[in-house]
Image: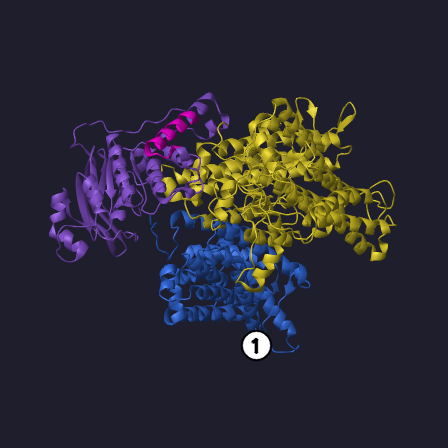
Amino acid sequence: MHELPQQLANGLILGSLYGLIAIGYTMVYGIVQLINFAHGEIFMTGGFGALTTYLILPPGTGLWLALPLMLLGGVLISVIVAVAAERFAYRPLRGAPKLAPLITAIGLSLALQQVVEQFYPGAKSGRSFPQLPGGPYHIGSVTLQPADIFLFVAAPLCMGALAAFVGKTRTGRGMQATAQDPDTAKLMGINTDRIIVIAFALGAAFAAVAAVGWGLRYGQVSPTMGFLAGLKAFTAAVLGGIGNIYGAMLGGLVLGVAEALATAYIQEIPGMHQLGGGSWANVWAFVLLIVVLLVRPQGLLGERVADRA
Amino acid sequence: MTTQTVPAPRPEGTAAATPLLEASGVVMRFGGLTAVNNVDLTVNTGEIVGLIGPNGAGKTTFFNCLTGLYVPTEGTVRYQGTVLPPKPHLVTSAGIARTFQNIRLFANMTVLENVLVGRHTRTKEGLLSALLRGPGYKKAEAEGREKAMELLEFIGLDHKADHLSRNLPYGEQRKLEIARAMASEPGLLLLDEPTAGMNPQETRAAEELVFAIRDKGISILVIEHDMRFIFNLCDRTAVLVQGQKIVEGDKETVQNDERVITAYLGAPLEGATDTAASTEADQ
Amino acid sequence: MTTTKSPALPLPLPAAKALVLAGGLATAASTFIHWTWTSEFPGDLTVDGYPGGLQILTLAAGLLIALFSLPLYGVKGTRWLTPAGPNAPVLVLGAAAAATTWFTLIAIATELGGLANLEPGGWIAGVASLLPLIGALGLPQTGPTVGLPSSGGVLAITRHYLGSFTRLVGPNPDLAPVKPLNRWVETLIIIAVAGLGLTVFTYGIVTEYGELFIGFLILTALGTWALMRAGLVSRLTALTARHRGTTTAAAFAAAAAFPFTQSDDHFASVGVNILIFATVALGLNVVVGLAGLLDLGYVAFLGVGAYAAALVSGSTSSPVGLHLPFWGAALVGMAAALVFGVVIGAPTLRLRGDYLAIVTLGFGEIFRIAVNSLDGVSGPKVTNGPNGIRNIPDLDILGFDFGQAHTFGSFTLGRFANYFLLMLLVTAFVVTVFSRANDSRIGRAWVAIREDETAAQAMGINGFKLKLLAFALGAALAGLAGTVMAHVSYSVVPDPYQFAGAVPPNSAFLVAAVVLGGMGTIAGPLLGATLLYLIPEKLVFLKEYQLLVFGIALVLLMRLRPEGLIANRRAQLEFHDKDTDTAAPAETDDAPASTDPGSTAGLTTAGA
């Protein structure tokens, strides 16, 4: 299966997953300069929330009806977790030295992962996620599964909605202002606390959408799914320019495509035949992160920020 | 990893007109904003030069260009004839030291430790030396402490050597910043609003201090808003308005220049008296 | 704020004092009666006349109370026990006795299924152990009086009441220095304290069952608090500061004596592991605690060192056919880790600290994946993949075979005991490196960078170079520890080198150890690693939930006491910015069998 179009399609799908998760990282970082380590786990709880919703629904509910409800359930859970985290773990540490919220985030990430692993029935070995019926669909030389269609639709929709929200609504503009200069924003009457909560919530919501997409695509949700996905999504956010929501999606797509291509093609390069393949994909993603940080640390769409003495 | 102190490149010239710092055509642009627009400034050895201007005129930005914190978009800055390296720590090593507009002491270190850190660039004991603790190391540490204490005596804080710098009263914190900057044995000291927040007695004491520093052979470039302080102190003063130098000269020249008066007060008035000493961030 | 206020309980003073003394003695005496009728509860608390298991803890508590009631009564020659006044320490000790005893009683009841399982002896002990506490509450205390908070709702009010005991006890005292005693007397004191520390520490390690360990923790924690509140700890700290060399030697000797106190090798293996993790935590402390760089993939450096050493130590499964002596393997391990440290650090240390956290996290994961895949199938054959490198031969240094048990007179040193002593040397080395680096021009520069990097650069400090130095040094130290670890466990496999896993070491564990113990101090990470290793070991039921507890603990710690258990003076000030200006000096805890000279590694003390 080494045809380029298929690989590209795979990459874009994977990338849209990363991008949706990356939005959460980038929004929070842009406003409060915090890497929300626990965001990967928020993504994960969204997945489990969606699964739970599905399990609650009467059996036999068509998946195309259940899907919106699952999305709702996932979003609900992930948003609750994110907002609670912001309110009780991060907000009290706003003035503290940088290390404190970072460590809190790590602790939170661990705790969330473990709570799900220990207390959600059957979570340890992964729970199977319902699949969309139908497919596979063939477009030219590319084969797509229904899950892929879902992502191809959901990701742009989410981006569009976000763009409209940030650019056109008062709250959205308030977010931009807070990201640029929180003190002045406050002086202008913007409720920065509320803005921050909204940022967390939005990020969580998109992550939940991604989680549903993930579950549909891979057929499974597990407590550890957030860790690696979160790491890569953060890479995507940096790649695209941290703080820039378009950058997040762009970075995600670039990363997804790079990963797909690396997995497929690196082993073709003479001498490197043992360094391609699934397990090395993560290594290459990481190498990409390092290269980006070296060559263009502000990311694709980011701007250099001057340090004010 | 030797244990000798590295002597500062102290300028040797005694003639007052030997240029120490030459900034020519310095331009600093941030995206669409030109913060510093084609500024020339020279500081000669043994001089005290003042830099004044309304808030937002670009004075601190200009300072940052002189210390490697910003790399000027255009123009050059030469110290002792050589173009400045673009990294702040190299600039300090070359002989320019500075204080900050908003005090940036190492709050949780003691007074003595702050000054010792200031000496960093004039000492060479690296990690290996610290780990091996040979006799050279101990000598260097003792010497460092001695010199630091000397500096503290000079500015009058030696009795508080072991106090945490955050516990000092404001005026003393400013003095400590100066001592810390002096610890790197500079040839040129840049002072950014050293008397901000000081009462008149403290300001007079600061004046004496600056003269004493000059007498030690260090040239000084100072940003200030307190006019009396500036004109008592400086041999020459340059005025920066909206990033451009509009006039430079001695007290009479500057005080009577209409453009200066307009820039500060907006209407012609007798003499350029002190404007409100606000501490808004200077861009 | 040191006004003496009226006591919490309105008792006449002589009655209060009597209660304390009598209660203490009664508590001690009650341990000689049996508390339960069945030996199903571990420790055999069924025999009269012989205190067993948890009863010993109560006995100790009771005797301590009796001892400290001497200064309470103003007995001549005992005032030195409580330089800051006896009322508060006695209160804490009373709480300790009550807590320990009641914990035991409740444990008995819960495990055996009902209060009926408690014999009258148990009830007597329960009552007796409350007497000193009641008496102590009748003593006037000098803690600050704080009114109910006016805002903050239920949460704030709850916090207010939860803190009331702590407020009653009051802050640890800031004592004026006192004339030093005769040099020999002071030396003897140091030796005695080291010995005491060893005893306490050994007791803790050797506890055979979880309940005893919990009781031990309760007693030790509250007991230490009492000693701190009494001012004994700060006197001791001042004393050890005067005799750095002796203290170090005594601590080292005490630690070295540990394996000799064991008749079998099992606890020596616990000891070695603690030492290894404590040392690695100390290495991480250089990076996180001194330079302020958050490294979340630190365990990878441990792994690099372990693998590198394993490859050159003559293992049969190593594709490299070298068998270097220990020092050679150690150098290889350190060098390999150092190289990786530089490779990872160089691109990322130029950037914001947040990025470093993620990148190091990624590197940690990548390391494990890479090492797992370099098995000749999915990658070139270097590390044998999931099987790892096994059968690493035991060390043989100067004819001393580490794999064999050796007998010295009546003492036997088993295999783990041998490695314990070797690791102790490594630990001592790392402690020296840390302490010397901290108290030096480089150490100051690191702290300056952490405080304000821009200002530091303006002072001529090359931020990048120094950060890289810290990072590389930390990596090298981890590599060194890895070398020993490879030999101790015969083999090196990829499994343990994760960010978070059930088995230490893993990066989350290490970060937690440093943070919990106290960043920037020497004793802090040592204590943190010890606790974090022992607690899941001893409390087996906790093992499953270990990571969950870690996570919650980290979150709570950052909220309540971000500076950790052993507070570095600077960190305490950094984190409690909004508190009063004249901050009380950080109390440094004399952790058992560990070198403490560095916890006041403040740079104002002259000398190395």
Q: Does residue C347 appear to the left or right of C75 in the view shown?
A: left
Camera sees residue C509: yes
At horizontal 79% and vertical 25% (from top left) the residue drawn is: C410
Residue A163 location, quadrant: bottom left
User: Closer to the camera, B181 or A303?
Assistant: B181
Tell me the colour chain B is drawn in.
purple
Tell me the colour chain C is drawn in.
yellow
Start-end of magenta stretch: B141-158
C33 drawn magenta:
no
Camera sees residue A11: no
How would you classify the magenta stretch by its main secondary structure?
helix
| Chain letter of the residue beneath label 1 in the structure image | A
Q: Which amino acid does label 1 sit on?
A: Trp
Dot 1 falls on a residue whose secondary structure is helix
Q: Where residue C421 appears, x then y in whole percent?
A: 67, 29
CA neighbours of label 1 inside 10 A, class few (<14), some (14 to 19), many (20+): few
